[in-house]
Image (cartoon, rainbow, N blue to C red):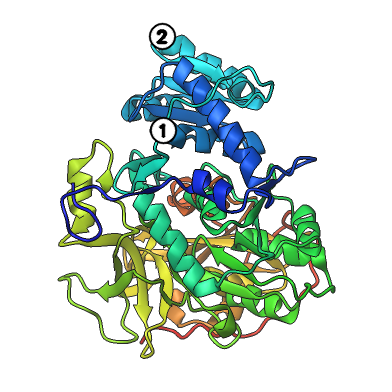
């Protein structure tokens, strides 16, 4: 087992929560509903829950699945699993029983912890897998004083090379892959983020992303590493997120659809100066949203990350957010980032290629998938499958997923760029762009558009609007007006589902057909501007 310093001896450090409770016992660790436990209280609660896991037969290295929505009990379970030396398997509550069963079997999980909302799904899984044991989350985290202390690591140490969690990718192509993430991956991710954003004594992170995804889970772990308060919301609600900011939240992470809903709900009111940064990830962010946020005094920083790198890889520094609209920033210390061509050679500035990443945040591999691991991890570099470019100053601009790239007449078209142009139209709420088979061009650019309530526009007018902003080969030749668009639990556009549904093109609207109004409330926002994202040459 190799450590960060190149030695063969595992690197052991004090357990984060246990040490945090010793350092700042009276500081508020979590806020949720009417609860606000301190770090000392959270430590004791994790200890009691770890004792219950021990009573359930959970030992070091065992996989414990967690099927639950966001809650403070979710957080307690995360720390209890780690304290037992077990491996956490957070499950997406939106998956079907068949999908969940496959992940449980692939990970070899024999214990499933579940909340009340997912009790039926848990019982259905146990009915088909008689070796699967069930433990209600409420029983695991009960604070009735009935459980003895933890049977975990009495030294209070953790091995940075040990696997903390297995997080399955969204599975845009084929079966999802179980990403192995170590304690060291999470620790270095937290360090890199802090070196970029800084730390403040009154920091409060809002966790409104799903905690079963890496973006949400990493916030929980940053909280104990930093000694920062984490406010947990059961689900994303734009009004609740805005109230939390007014109430003292200084940092939060969202995706672009969440950002738009927050700005929409905020209307004309500026955000308070206490809000230090809003990290926006999950894919390229439409430039008009970044400009709109700037107009409302919201300090937005676009970020690029992925599950295989324990969340953030590159993030724009807050001081540069207004001057570098569209950029995902530079790689966080100590991460390395390159953009390479098909032969693995570094691309010149401005030339698009595949984004590759190297550093201590990168996964050691995929569970039970040696071929996939070998394909993704080559010569120490993680090949992400994402397309982007670096400008002359070294700032990363993310264009799209390689799997979503459209090649039309020999020209590369990045769907996110076309979607940003469409979403700059005042009648358009959201758009999804994909390639449709075409005999002449190989692929033709097609778009599914959702209009705002009361919005009306012709496909011909949208085509003309795009031609003012994009090269002719990027302009969609077919439009479908429908909605809402499919999204993952984290709010990312599930473009592959759009492609599968409409790629045949039989239902696509001819260019001159007038369309019906889409769904969603009206939105007052600044007049659309030409996107500032520098186009690749």
Q: What element carries label 2?
A: loop
Q: Nearer the viewer, residue 250 or 18?
A: 18
Q: Is residue 239 above or below residue 49?
A: below
Q: In this view, does 367 lie above or below 117?
A: below
Q: Which residue is drawn at 58% across and 83% down?
A: 319
Residue receiving disc 1: 154
| Label 2 Cα neighbours within 10 Å, binned few <14 / some 14-19 / many ≥20 | few
Dot label at residue 462: none
Q: Which of 521 and 62 is in front in this view?
A: 62
The answer to which image quadrant residue 247 occupies is: bottom right
The answer to which image quadrant residue 144 occupies is: top right
Q: Which of marks 2 and 1 is in front?
A: 1
Dots 2, 1 in contact, CB < 8 A: no
Q: Earlier in the sequence, mark 2 or mark 1?
A: 2
| Label 1 Cα neighbours within 10 Å, binned few <14 / some 14-19 / many ≥20 | few
Dot label at residue 130: 2
Q: Is mark 1 on a helix, strand or loop?
A: loop
Image coordinates for residue 346, horizontal then vertical, percent: 22, 79
Q: Residue at x 48, y 48 (%)?
A: 16
Image coordinates for residue 69, horizontal then vertical, percent: 62, 36
């Amino acid at each position: 087992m190799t450590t960060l310093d190149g030695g063969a001896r595992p690197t052991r450090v004090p357990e984060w929560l246990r040490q945090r409770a010793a350092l700042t016992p009276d500081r508020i660790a979590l806020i949720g509903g009417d609860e606000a436990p301190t770090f000392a209280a959270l430590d004791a609660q994790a200890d009691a829950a770890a004792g219950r896991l021990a009573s359930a037969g959970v030992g070091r290295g065992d996989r414990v699945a967690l099927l639950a929505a966001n809650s403070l009990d979710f957080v307690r379970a995360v720390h209890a699993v780690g304290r037992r030396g077990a491996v956490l398997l957070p499950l997406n509550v939106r998956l079907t029983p068949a999908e969940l069963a496959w992940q449980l079997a692939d990970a070899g999980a024999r214990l499933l912890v579940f909340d009340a909302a997912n009790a039926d799904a848990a019982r259905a899984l146990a009915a088909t897998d008689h070796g699967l044991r069930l433990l209600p989350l409420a029983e695991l985290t009960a604070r009735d004083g009935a459980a003895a202390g933890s049977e975990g690591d009495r030294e209070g140490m953790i091995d940075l090379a040990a696997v903390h969690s297995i997080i399955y990718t969204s599975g845009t192509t084929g079966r999802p892959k179980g990403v192995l993430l170590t304690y060291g991956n999470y620790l270095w991710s937290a360090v890199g983020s802090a070196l970029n954003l800084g730390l403040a004594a009154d920091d409060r992170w809002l966790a409104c992303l799903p905690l079963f995804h890496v973006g949400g889970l990493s916030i929980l772990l940053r909280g104990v590493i930093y000694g920062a308060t984490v406010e947990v919301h059961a689900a994303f609600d734009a009004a609740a997120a805005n109230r939390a900011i007014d109430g003292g939240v200084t940092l939060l992470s969202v995706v672009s659809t969440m950002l738009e809903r927050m700005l929409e709900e905020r209307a004309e009111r500026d955000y308070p100066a206490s809000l230090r940064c809003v990290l926006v990830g999950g894919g390229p962010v439409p430039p008009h949203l970044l400009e709109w946020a700037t107009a409302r005094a919201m300090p937005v920083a676009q970020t690029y990350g992925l599950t295989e790198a324990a969340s953030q890889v590159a993030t724009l520094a807050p001081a540069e957010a207004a001057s570098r609209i569209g950029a995902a920033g530079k790689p966080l210390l100590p991460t390395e980032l390159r953009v390479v061509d098909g032969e693995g050679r570094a691309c010149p500035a401005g030339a698009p290629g595949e984004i590759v990443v190297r550093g201590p945040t990168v996964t050691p591999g995929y569970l039970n998938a040696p071929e996939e691991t070998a394909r993704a991890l080559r010569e120490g570099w993680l090949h992400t499958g994402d397309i982007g470019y670096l400008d002359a100053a070294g700032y990363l601009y993310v264009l799209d997923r390689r799997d979503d790239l459209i090649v039309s007449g020999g020209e590369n078209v990045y769907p996110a760029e076309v979607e940003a142009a469409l979403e700059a139209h005042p009648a358009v709420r959201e758009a999804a762009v994909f390639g449709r088979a075409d005999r002449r061009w190989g692929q033709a650019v097609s778009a599914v558009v959702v209009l705002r309530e009361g919005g009306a526009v012709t496909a011909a007018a949208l085509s003309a609007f795009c031609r003012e902003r994009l090269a002719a080969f990027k302009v969609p030749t077919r439009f479908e007006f429908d909605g809402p668009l499919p999204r993952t639990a984290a709010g990312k556009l599930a473009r592959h589902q759009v492609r599968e549904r409409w790629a045949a093109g039989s239902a696509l609207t001819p260019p001159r057909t007038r369309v019906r109004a889409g769904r969603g409330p009206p939105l007052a926002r600044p007049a659309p501007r030409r996107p500032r994202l520098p186009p690749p040459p």
